[in-house]
Amino acid sequence: MEIKITRTTRPVAKPLAQEEAGTLGFGNYFSDHMFLMDYEEGKGWHNARIEPFHDLAIHPAATALHYGQEIFEGMKAYRGKNDEILFFRPRNNAQRWNDSARRMCMPTMDPDLYCQALNALVDLERDWVPHAPGTSLVLRPAMIATDPYLGVHPSKRYLFFILCSPSGAYFKNGMAPVSIYVEEELIRAAPGGTGFAKCGGNYAGSMLAGERAAEKGYDQVLWLDGKEHKYVEEVGSMNMMFVIDGTIVTAPLDGTILPGVTRDSILTLAKDAGWKTEERKISIDEVYQAAREGRLDEAFGTGTAAVVSPVGRLCYKGEEIVIHNGKIGPKAAYLYDRLLNIQLGNYEDKFGWVTVCK
Ligand code: COI
């Protein structure tokens, strides 16, 4: 599809001082341009364009604002060797995008078009991809339903847009192990719900538990399954992995957790390292039992934003366990190093995950 490009006449200053000081944070700054494209029933996707970054004007009755018909993706562009700009498994995000869209009664998109849009925007914004170690250009594709009606039904019109945000680590302490509170009462998802879709409502619904966990001094919430409040699901911003007796155990993809691209990559890298992995239901009692018996070697989260994030402390029903002495464990460290250096083009890309922005 042809993409009309309108360049900004007022480029903004890049956050170079923050990049140098390591204070970019996550999603605080935005580049000069954004990608936009419209959809209308009967007409399909049209009017693909890159414009100077601007606020959106939408009808106050737009379906997205009232009924949450909205999805998004989390991706990054990395600065590799020789200043090449690299994407990591973008077609996997395109595929997940379409799965989310179908669940939310929204239009899907040809993965080629999705990747073309990303490439065109990042190509124009390549100077915005930060250089400092641990930084990247966070890409945020999103789609909102724009029909101006208050009836509850799928919109016939949508706006797709992509934002670019030069960012550092998702967690303010970088790779330092995070503390996690296991939520006993509230749930994130239930069988048949929208847990696997990357829709805004999943995140809005998780904020109360996040606030309560923060009040108790924990960084993140670990969700248990919605039916029995027994099995470990995910953290919301990342999938969870436990290393028990040397085996990496993670929740299965059965509809209530986000099918993380990083989750899949880490499982692949772990198998490639000759380690045993299991995708199966794992109860919080099993995690605690393993901890009591000294068999819980490590715990870590995986996600595009979080990369590989070690978990140092876990609290469930008032009982806190400290994992790997509150320090990063060897498997998490190894997997982080492998993944990041494949993403940066430093290690051999034997699974064909990296594509160059052209
Ligand atoms: C990501 O990992 O990129 C995400 O989209 C998670 C997030 C909500 C920050």
Image (cartoon, rainbow, N blue to C red):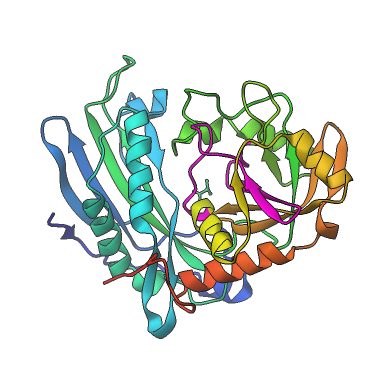
Q: Position of residue 90 (x, y in %)?
A: 36, 57
Viewer-nearest residue: 76 or 346: 346
Q: Which region is colored magenta?
A: 233-262
Q: What residue is drawn where x is 88% and y is 37%?
A: 319
Whether residue 142 is visible, yes or no, is no
Q: Would residue 255 be counted in the magenta stretch?
A: yes
Relative to residue 198, is residue 187 drawn left or right?
right
Count every numbered label the image shows and give the total.
0
**Against 137, is 242 above or below?**
above
Q: Position of residue 43 (x, y in %)?
A: 11, 35
Q: Would residue 332 be counted in the magenta stretch?
A: no
Q: Position of residue 84 (x, y in %)?
A: 36, 78
Q: What residue is drawn where x is 87% and y is 51%?
A: 294
Q: Quadrant of the C terminus?
A: bottom left
Q: What residue is drawn where x is 48% and y is 79%?
A: 346
Magenta portion: prevailing SS class: loop
Relative to residue 104, is residue 170 drawn left or right?
right
Hey, which quadrant is residue 118 in on the image?
A: bottom left
| Residue farthest to the bottom, as pictured | 82
Q: Position of residue 193 (x, y in %)?
A: 48, 24
Relative to residue 315, is residue 144 drawn left or right?
left
Whether residue 237 is visible, yes or no, is yes
Q: Quadrant of the N terminus?
A: bottom left
**Against 290, is 298 above or below?**
below
Hey, which quadrant is residue 11 in on the image?
A: bottom left
**Against 318, is 269 above or below?**
below
